[in-house]
Every structure is written in C-alpha cells, then in structure tokens.
Amino acid sequence: MRLRILGSMAGAAMALLAPAGGAAAQECSVKVGAIFPTSVDWGKPIAETALWVADMINQAGGVDGCKVETILRDDQNDAKVGVDAAKALVDISKVQLLLGTVASGITIPILTSVSVPAGTMQMSCCSSSTRLTAMANEGATKGLWFRTFATSSVQGAVAAMAAKEAGYKKVTIFFKNDDWGQDIAKIAANAFAKSGIEVTTQIAITDGQPSYRAEVARALAAKGDAVYLALYPKEGIAVVREWLSLGGTTNMIGANALKSDDFRNTVGMQHLANFVGTDTSTPRTDSAKGFVAAFTAKFGKAPAGPGLPNSFDAAAISLLAYHAAGRNATGAQIAAKVGMVTDPKGEKVNGDVDGFKKALGLLKQGKTVSFQGGTGAVAFDKNGDVSAPAVLWTFGASGVQEKRYITLEEVGAFISSVK
Amino acid sequence: MSGVVSYLVFFATMAGILGIVVLGLNLQWGYTGLFNGGVAAFFGAGAYVTMILGGRPEPGQFGGFQLPFVIALAGGIASAGLAAWFFGRLTLRLRHDYLAIATFGVAVAFESVARNAEWLLGGAKGLRGFPRPLEAAIGNNFLYGLFFLTLVMAVLLAVYVGLERLVHSPYGRALRAIREDEIAAQSLGKNPARLRLQSFVIGSMIMGAAGGLYVAFYAFVSPQDLAPVLTFQVWAMLIVGGAGNNLGAILGAYLIWAAWTASGFLLAAFAPQAMQLYTGPIQYILIGSVIVGMLLWRPQGILPERIARSGHRASGATTADNGGN
C-alpha cells in the first residue's frame, strides 16, 4: 500500500529524494529527537503532548510513509545535559529534526553548538528569549530555527495600539526590572515611538522596595499624559498608589501581569475607569477549541499549564514539513518546507488524525496547507518567530472584562507597521 | 561510526572541562578541607569574564573587547582568583558547614547578579558570540572538535601536573596538616588563615580556567549555567573519584559524567515506549543511587588518598618553612 501511495506522487518534494523510491515497500522509520525537561513537573506534559502528535501522525500514515520514532531525552533544566543529549541525538541517532527545549539558556547552546553546525532543524515550543530573534536576524541560525511561542512583541505593540486609540501623546513607562520587564518595555517604547507617541521616560521598578516615591516623582516630572505599566500586581499596586496620591494621571495602560483582582480592589475602581490592559489570547478559532477538546479527551483533563498548545503545534508543523521534504531530507530541506505547512492560502487542515491524513495527502501532491493548530493558524516570520492574537481588557464591576479581541491578522499588520 | 567518534570527542571535552573543576575542588576540599559550596560562582566568574574580554561587541552590552583567547582566559582566571580572595577573606574563618552555606550564598548571589545586571552580564538572555580560538583556521567541524579536546586535555594535564607537584611538596603537607588539625599546625608555626586563603584562591582560579574553556566551547553563557546543580555534580565527582587524589578527581569526573549522560542515552534507546516519559526521573534515581552506593560502600572514593611516606623525617620541619608563615 505504501508503494502505491509513493508511486502515485510526482510532486516537487519528491525530486529531493529520488533514490528513496525503491525501498518504499519495506518497513521504515524516521527518527526525531525531542529534548524536554521531563523531570520537571511542568515539562512532562509538554513532552507528552509532542509524543501524542507523533502518534497521531503515525496513525495518519507517518512521515513519507515511514513511522515516526521519537527519541525523547530529558534536559534536566541543565545546559550541559541538554547539549549532550542533543549531540548524541544528532551524531549517534542521526536525527535531522530536534524538538525543544523549554529554557532559552539550554535552547541557545543546543542551537549554536549542535543544531546549526550539523545542519539539523530545531523547533521549540517554549523558549522566550529575544536573543533568539536577534540571532536569527543576524543569520546565525541559518534558517534552521523556529519557535511556536509568541514573544512579548505582541503585547508591546498592542500597548501602542491602545495608546493611539485613546489619543495619548506622551507616555511614561514603568517596568519590572527583570528580563520580562526589560524586554517588554524596550518593545513597547519602540512601538510607541513608531506610532508617533512620545516616550517621556522609562523607569525601572525593582521588586520589594519599601517605597517607590523617588521613581514616581521622576515620572511626574516627565509630565506624560498617560503611563504604561509593565509590572506585576504587588509592585504595580505600590507604584500606582504613590502615583495617584501625588496627582498622577489615571490614564493607564497595563500589561497582562496586572490582570489581578488584588490590583483592582486595592487601587480602587474609582481610579481605574481609564485603565486598559493588554494580553495575548488563545485564538477564537475552531482549531484552538478543537485542540482543547482533543487534549481533554486524550488525557482526561483540560490543557492547563504553560506551552501545551505550542508544543502541539511545534511537533505537528515540523513533522508535516518533514513529510513534505521526504524521509531522507536534511534539516535544511525540512526547514525549507515549513512554509508549505503554514501557508495562509493553503487548504485548512486540523490537528487531529483526519486532519493529518488530509495534510499528508495534500503535501505529497506538492500542495500547500494551512495548519490550524492549538495556537491557531500559525505563521512564522523570517526569524522563525510567530505572532498571536491579542485582547484589550478593562476592570469592571465584576472583575476583568474583555474590551476588544484583536485578530492575528490585525496584530500582524500593526506590528509590521511599527517595525 | 564517525558520528559515534564525534560524540565521544564531544563527551570527552565536556568531561575534561568538568575534570578541571573537580581538580580545583580537590585542592580546596581534598587537601585543605575547605567545604566550598559555591563552585558555580568561581566557574561562572571565569566563564563570564572570559566572555566579556574575548567576545564580540553587541549594542547596549558591556564587554565584547575581542581580546585574543589566551588573554581573555587569563582575565577569566584572574577574576575567579580575585573573587575567591575577596570572599575568602570574608568567609574562610568559618568552618565546614558554615563555610559551605556562606559560599553557597555567594554562588546564589552571583547567579542573581548575572540574571539582573543586563548591561553588565547580559541578564537572563545571557551572553553569546565568542569567537572560538582558531575555528576559522581549522574550518572542519570534526577536526575542530578534536583540536578543542586537545586544548582541554592540555589544560587538564597542566593543572594535574602542577597540583601533583604542589601537594607533594612541603607546601602540600602544610595544607594537609591544616586539614587534619589546625591547632597542631599552628603550633608548628604555620599560618592557617593564610594557607587556607591561598588554597582557596588557587583552587578557584582552576575552576575559573574551566569556566573560560566552557565559554569557548559553547560560545554562550547564561545564568542557567550557574545553577546550584553544577556545584552538586562537581562534588559528586570528587567524592566518587576520591577526595585527596588528583587522579581520582579526574576519574570521578569522567565516570559521573558518563553515568549522567549514558543513563539518559540508554534509557532513551532501550526503555519501553510507555516508559519514555519517565526516563528523566528514572535517570535522576540512577544517578542518586550510584552516589549513595559509593558513599555507603566506598566512602574514600575509587582512588583513595595515599599519603606518601617520603624520606624527610627530621628535615620536615625546615623544608616546610617554604609553605608556612
């Protein structure tokens, strides 16, 4: 039967692996490396999700007719262990595709000292560091790197969108002094400036200080007509209280970390009428709901915990691209086919066994598909990054209320307008 | 086949780097009895400073001085020594468990600084872009791997030979005397405070050298590399190999690192599909069992310390003067 499937196709993809045709009738397998922190409580479900996708691809016919054999290694959240595992997978098991890992501090050395030198494609569900974008941008990843994790660029840009809509002209930024806060403040400041909003000053807020009076006084002196708060609730409460008591404006835009009842109740609704929050959102697409339903059916519980839809999509997209490139493809050849799986103009396919069957068939004919995954219709930019839909929210009488849902397309258009 | 060789070269390089760290700890604990719980800090100081001195410049980032590798590495070693001198002055009066806690605190503080001082040490995203020595000249990936292994082995050998000479000299006997009975050593005219500090600084400089090699190997360093697990791994290597025996320290590094990585490899290769998700925790259990087993049945390590009975006898007191005071 495999012979028939293989024999019937004449797509451009097949040209890459002409010598493989003859061996088609045999049982074959493609090895795929997966590195996740499986010994960490939240890491195990991420790995489990990736293995589940490989199972479904196998049920749907496998990668280019071959069974996907996932070799799962634990990185123990230790860079030395993760890089060693990657090196063994690439050198000894000869994998052309690596899935993982979570911590950027491990993903980066794997990428720079194993994947890129060996020409192996690497796709991560969860690494968030902006360094990866910078590396891709300067060409250090040679197009072999992808991630399905939406970076802070979405929230930073949407903050500027909200400020523009509210008609603010001069914004002052408070940010939490850690990697998340430093990152998002930088992105937001750039987005504000590019949308014609002046950033008066950016003030770092270090955790656990008894008072933020000095910081707040500096912000007041800058005389902005609005503030942007990339803070966590505890420091956010302290800063906003001092800010309001010294006569600061109630025109506030906040990052998703402030989505807390504590913040709302302590600051008081009378001061929050003009507050707008930003957040990334799970997409309101059928495929995202489908993922939740399928995950619940498979594991008996809803997908709670970080990175699960992202892991699902990373595994699915990279395996479908592997299929499109053929069983003997190299990492670079697989990476080149990712666009075929995430083509917005392609036929929509869902992340279930039937969807994968359909996708495998279409890809074999050389047609593109638009994979509808757990995080929606994923599309990578030239740096291997993805975007996400966003929401604007406000505080209402009963807690957090959604103000507006911003689709992936709108977010994408706005981000490219402030680049 | 070539893949296996390539992997083994990689493995031997990383184990060699860890072996250098273990040698540094062996001088501190094995010979002088200093319970250093902050190995990661001195390893990290060497790694970060080597990166800052030798790395490529990046916008908005301190460092990237692009100094030649040897100078960058020397800077890394010196800074690890300087850090050890500073913290040694503060903490070395503490004994055993107190010293362990204090030095552990130093390591945690260093990690915290590296994570937060973004302009200086890159923050959580780390520092990258180290031009690996002679990489362009060698070109081929596999040959470069071999070259780097040779470099690490050369440093490992140099440290080993240097330490062997040091610990078999009268100076080494003075260190052991302090380890065994500080008051007795003092009564013989030794200055324990100074000797302890010297041993601590030299050992930490060796760890810093390993950190510098590590940065050149990965061309990347982040706070992830400074996690307390590194200190634990190095201690496990020393205890299993044999504290007070330099050959044992190196052997321990290779054995423990082999157990650490091979257990993951073998479990991934041979464990049934259904068990795949649990290989991570099983690996931890295996590693832990090896260490516990060693402590129970061979607490002195695979190659225990051997005290050489040299022919010094009566002349011991005068020759030891080189080391004391």
Image (cartoon, coloured by chain):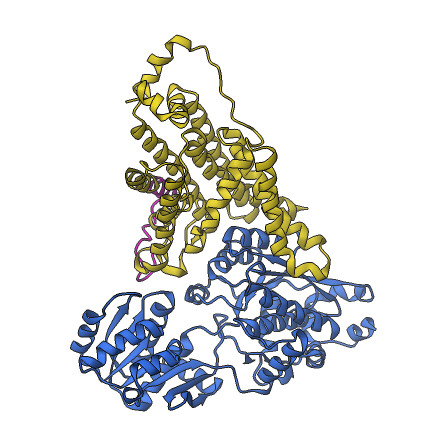
Q: Is residue A417 visible?
A: no
Quadrant that contains the C terminus of chain A: bottom left
Question: Relative to A252, is B22 on the left or the right?
Answer: right
Q: Is residue B294 magenta?
A: no
Q: Is residue B69 magenta?
A: yes
Q: Most extreme residue toward the top, as rendered?
A: B314
Viewer-proximal residue among A223 and B134: A223
Q: Position of residue A93 (x, y in %)?
A: 67, 54
Viewer-proximal residue among A371 and A46: A46
- Above or below: residue B325 compared with residue A76: above
Q: How many marks?
A: 0
Viewer-proximal residue among A215 and A375: A215
Q: What residue is rendered at 41% in x and 51% in y?
A: B130
Q: Most extreme residue toward the left, as rendered?
A: A221
Among the 4 quarters of the image, the one containing residue A218? bottom left
Query: What chain is colored yellow?
Result: B
Look at the image and give the residue range highlighted in magenta: B57-77
Quadrant that contains the N terminus of chain A: bottom right
Q: Colour of chain A?
A: blue
Q: Position of residue B177 (x, y in %)?
A: 39, 23
